Image (tube, rainbow, N blue to C red):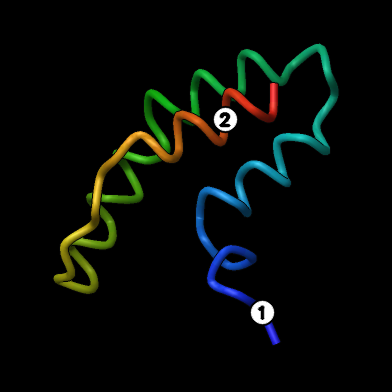
């Protein structure tokens, strides 16, 4: 099956970002870091009423991808 690491949001985003055109990775990574994770956090809180742990893991994942 899948490990927790394989299904984490950060891992999925990092894999997706690595498959994007190299010319756009920095821009996409910045947008994801600045907007996507906050929007995802808000959506999960609204729909699932679950707290979303906000840490710097997504920042590290994006920086590793670009």
Q: Residue at x 72, y 46 (%)?
A: 15
Q: Is residue 38 left or right of residue 34?
A: left
Q: Is residue 34 left or right of residue 55?
A: right
Q: Which mark is residue 35?
A: none
Front-lying residue, 3 or 48? 3
The quarter holding residue 34 reads top left
Q: Residue at x 57, y 63 (%)?
A: 5
Q: Which residue is mark 1?
A: 2
| Residue 63 place in picture, x, y as percent | 58, 23
Residue pushed farthest bottom?
A: 1
The quarter holding residue 38 reads top left
Q: Residue at x 64, y 65 (%)?
A: 6
Whether residue 47 is situated above or below residue 28 in the rendered picture: below
Quarter of the figure that contains the N terminus: bottom right
The quarter holding residue 26 reads top right
Q: Which residue is mark 2?
A: 62
Q: Is residue 60 left or right of residue 12?
A: left
Front-lying residue, 47 or 5? 5
At label 1, counting other C-alpha atoms closer than 10 Å, the crowd grade (few under 14, some 14-19, many 20 or more) is few
Q: Secondary structure at mark 2?
A: helix
Front-lying residue, 64 or 48? 64
Q: Secondary structure at mark 1?
A: loop
Q: Is residue 52 left or right of residue 14?
A: left
């Amino acid at each position: 099956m899948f490990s927790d690491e394989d299904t984490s949001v950060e891992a999925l985003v990092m894999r997706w970002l690595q498959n994007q055109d190299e010319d756009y990775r920095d821009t996409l990574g910045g947008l994801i870091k600045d907007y996507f994770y906050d929007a995802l956090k808000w959506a999960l809180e609204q729909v699932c009423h679950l707290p979303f742990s906000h840490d710097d893991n997504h920042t590290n994942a994006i920086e590793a991808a670009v």
